[in-house]
Image: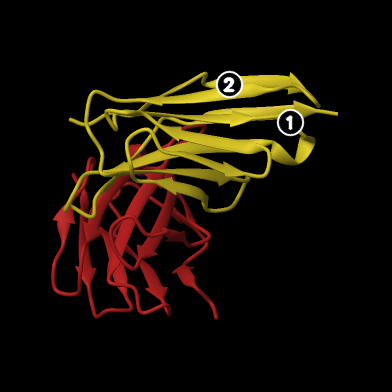
Chain colours: A red, B yellow
């Protein structure tokens, strides 16, 4: 059982470049999340998908878009990367409210 | 905007000491979770509390949810070096499936 997987693990971008972060879960979870974590900080919610077919903004959605491709996959897209988007990005999934969130290993993104 | 403030931000203690970490908000949450995160990894759930006034114990860790469901605390008895890590609280507002994480408490336990 792989749990939550994220690709890539590391990425370096130049300002203005675009990229998509991929996330997949094999636990048949309904809800999926994208967070960012800046050094020494807690996690901030970017977007979430409460169930397949729905997506909603979190605390810091500007500069990002998401796609819930199917129940397993939830991708995060940066259309025009900025240095302020340098961070570690975590994907998570959960069966429902009050349930455990399972996190992926993270994607470390550096925007120059 | 919902905010979860954790205190202290940093804590360095000797093995065997006790400590308490606080998680406070002006918002009411339907549930509150505590996670521990090791360097280079994602957070891992320690506990979920859902009822105001609820107390849960996990070996040397005691978690409490405030009566008004706006705050929570984590108490560690006889801390060990293995307790070192970043502790995060996360609150969920009823019916939204949306989790707000606290600012984090970085704990270091010295042998």
Q: Quadrant of residue B60?
A: top right
Q: Which residue is mark 2?
A: B10
First reached walking from the N terminus: tag 2 or tag 1: 2
Image quarter of residue A70: bottom left
At x 23%, y 41%, the residue is A60
Chain letter belonging to callout 1: B
Nearer to us in this view, A110 or B111 = B111
Q: Of circles 2 and 1, which is in front?
A: 1
For the residue pair B85 and A18, the one nearer the viewer reads as B85
Any part of residue A112 in sight:
no
Q: Position of residue B62 (x, y in %)?
A: 57, 35
User: Which of the two residues, B59 or B40, is positioned nearer the viewer here?
Assistant: B59
**Is residue B6 at least partly visible in the picture?**
yes
The N terminus of chain A, quarter of image: bottom right
Q: Is residue B20 above or below residue A87?
A: above
Mark 2 → mark 1, Cα distance in angstroms: 15 Å
Q: Measured from the top left, where is residue A6 in percent x and y?
A: 46, 67
Q: Is residue A19 above or below residue A14?
A: below
* Foreground residue among B86 and B29: B29
Helix, strand or loop for disc 1: loop
Q: Secondary structure at mark 2?
A: strand
**Eyeballing the image, is A48 above or below A84?**
below
Which residue is most to the right?
Answer: B111
Subunit of label 2: B
Instruction: Find residue A87 and report its horizontal and vertical position in percent.
Output: 43, 44
Q: Which quarter shows the C terminus of chain A?
A: top left
The residue beneath circle 1 is B79
In the rendered picture of this protein, how many numbered marks are placed on residues? 2
Disc 1 residue crowd, few under 14, some 14–19, many 20+, Cα 10 Å: many
Q: Residue B50: percent from the left, percent from the top?
A: 34, 45
Q: Left or right: A79 with respect to B24?
A: left
């Amino acid at each position: 059982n792989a749990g939550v997987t994220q690709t890539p693990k590391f990425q370096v971008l130049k300002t203005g470049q675009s990229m998509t972060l991929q996330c997949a879960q094999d636990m048949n979870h309904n809800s999926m999340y994208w967070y960012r974590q800046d050094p020494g900080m807690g996690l901030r919610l970017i977007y979430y998908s409460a169930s397949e077919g729905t997506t909603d903004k979190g605390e810091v959605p500007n500069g990002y878009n998401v796609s819930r491709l199917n129940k397993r996959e939830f991708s995060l897209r940066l259309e025009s990367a900025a240095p302020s988007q340098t961070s570690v990005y975590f994907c998570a999934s959960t069966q429902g409210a009050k349930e455990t969130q399972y996190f992926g290993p993270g994607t470390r993104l550096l925007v120059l | 905007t919902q905010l979860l403030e954790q205190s202290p931000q940093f804590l360095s203690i000797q093995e065997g000491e006790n400590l308490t970490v606080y998680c406070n908000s002006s918002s009411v949450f339907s549930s509150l979770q505590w996670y521990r995160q090791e360097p280079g990894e994602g957070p891992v759930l320690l506990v979920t509390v859902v009822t105001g006034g609820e107390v849960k114990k996990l070996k040397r860790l005691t978690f409490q949810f405030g009566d008004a469901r706006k705050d929570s605390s984590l108490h560690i008895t006889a801390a060990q070096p293995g307790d070192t890590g970043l502790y995060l609280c996360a609150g969920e507002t009823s019916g939204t499936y949306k989790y707000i994480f606290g600012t984090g408490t970085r704990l270091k336990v010295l042998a």
